[in-house]
Amino acid sequence: MVDKIPMTIAGYKKLEEELKERQQEIRPRIIKEIEEARAHGDLSENAEYHAAKEAQSMNEGRIMELEGTLGRAEVINPKKMNGNTVKFGATVKIVDEDTDEEKTYQIVGDLEADLKDGKISLSSPIARALIGKEEGDSVEVTAPGGTRGYEILEVNYI
């Protein structure tokens, strides 16, 4: 059985866009580079040819990876969810119980995680601690930097 990969609609669209760009823009450009390098003659000592072939190999590998990921994607629309319980797709506002620093995170799939954008992976220690909890609950998160306590202030599905 194939494992499904949970992701939001935005994450799915981002991967689709990358796949389209690699297939329709990057692939033809690399093919053209290979043709031009071939025209220079002796392929055994042709650095441009070898670089283009390597780029082609890397691009085709990424295309295969994207196709596999998109084929196994389980797209979840957070806007169709509700409640005060933290689940995949939730945007959670928490406060550090020691420093009173507030943070807001959306819980997304591993491939979408981007801490700078406030998106944390479902498999991250903080997301694992938050899943199943509700507004007002306190959680302890054990991470490489030590254990921290957080209170859940808000749970939204936007």
Image: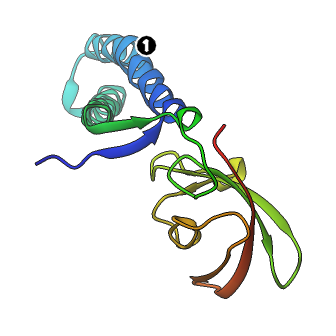
- The residue located at (49%, 30%) in the rendering is 9
Image position, residue 28 (x, y; %): 35, 11
Neighbour tally class for label 1: few under 14, some 14-19, many 20 plus, Cα within 10 Å:
few
Q: Is residue 139 above or below residue 86?
A: below
Image position, residue 61 (x, y; %): 26, 36
Q: Is residue 90 above or below residue 126?
A: above
- Give the quarter of the image for residue 102: bottom right
- Badge 1 element: helix
- Give the quarter of the image for residue 95: bottom right
User: Which residue is outermost to the left?
Assistant: 1
Image-based side of 111 in relation to 138, left or right: left
User: Which residue is outermost to the front?
Assistant: 83
Task: Name the residue tied to disc 1.
Answer: 25
- The residue located at (32%, 37%) in the rendering is 73
- The residue located at (63%, 42%) in the rendering is 157
- Give the quarter of the image for residue 43: top left
- Mark count: 1
Q: Quadrant of the C terminus?
A: top right
- The residue located at (33%, 46%) in the rendering is 5
Q: Which of these two is toward me, 83 or 55?
A: 83
User: Which residue is outermost to the bottom?
Assistant: 146
Image position, residue 29 (x, y; %): 40, 14
Image-based side of 66 in relation to 64, left or right: right
User: Which residue is outermost to the right?
Assistant: 100
Image-based side of 106 in relation to 76, left or right: right
The residue under label 1 is which amino acid type?
Glu
Image position, residue 113 (x, y; %): 55, 51
